[in-house]
Image: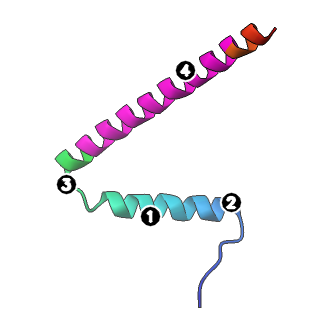
Amino acid sequence: MPTYLSNVSDRESQTAWVSKLTKSYYQDDQQAKLMHLQAEVDSLLQQLENLKHQRQAETNQKEE
């Protein structure tokens, strides 16, 4: 029988637990590499968001 979580804090707790469990499978050097790659991905996503907003602003200015 599946267990359903009733609220957001329960889901966040489960997510944190799963994250810790998953990370424990990696050796320290692999974990460091994974964290570095995650930081790079986050940075690239932020750059894409900035470009998107910049292009939207330029488009809005041209339409005025």
Identify the amino acid type marked 1. Val
- The image shows residue 30 at horizontal and vertical percentages of 20, 48
Disc 1 is placed on an element classified as: helix
Where does label 2 land, which residue?
8
Q: Residue at x 56, y 27 (%)?
A: 49
- Dot placed on the residue nearer the N-terminal end, 4 or 3: 3
Q: Nearer the viewer, residue 42 or 3?
A: 42
Instruction: Say if 1 sits above or below 18 in the image.
Output: below
Q: Nearer the viewer, mark 1 or mark 4?
A: 4
Helix, strand or loop: magenta stretch? helix
User: Rounded to the nearest whole Å, what is the CA distance between mark 4 and mark 3?
Assistant: 36 Å
Where does label 3 land, which residue?
27
Asked if the residues shown at circle 4 and circle 3 are in contact, with their CB atoms under 8 angstroms apart, the answer is no
Going by the image, does 49 lie left or right of 31? right
Q: Residue furthest bottom?
A: 1
User: Rounded to the nearest whole Å, what is the CA distance between mark 2 and mark 4?
Assistant: 32 Å
Identify the amino acid type marked 2. Val
Where does label 4 land, which residue?
51
- Dot placed on the residue nearer the N-terminal end, 1 or 4: 1
User: Rounded to the nearest whole Å, what is the CA distance between mark 3 and mark 1?
Assistant: 17 Å
Q: Residue at x 42, y 29 (%)?
A: 44
User: Rounded to the nearest whole Å, what is the CA distance between mark 2 and mark 1?
Assistant: 15 Å
Disc 3 is placed on an element classified as: loop
- Marks counted in the figure total 4
- Dot placed on the residue nearer the N-terminal end, 3 or 1: 1
Which residues are the magenta region? Answer: 33-58
Identify the amino acid type marked 4. Leu
Disc 2 is placed on an element classified as: helix
Q: Residues within 10 Å of mark 3 (few under 14, many from 20)?
A: few
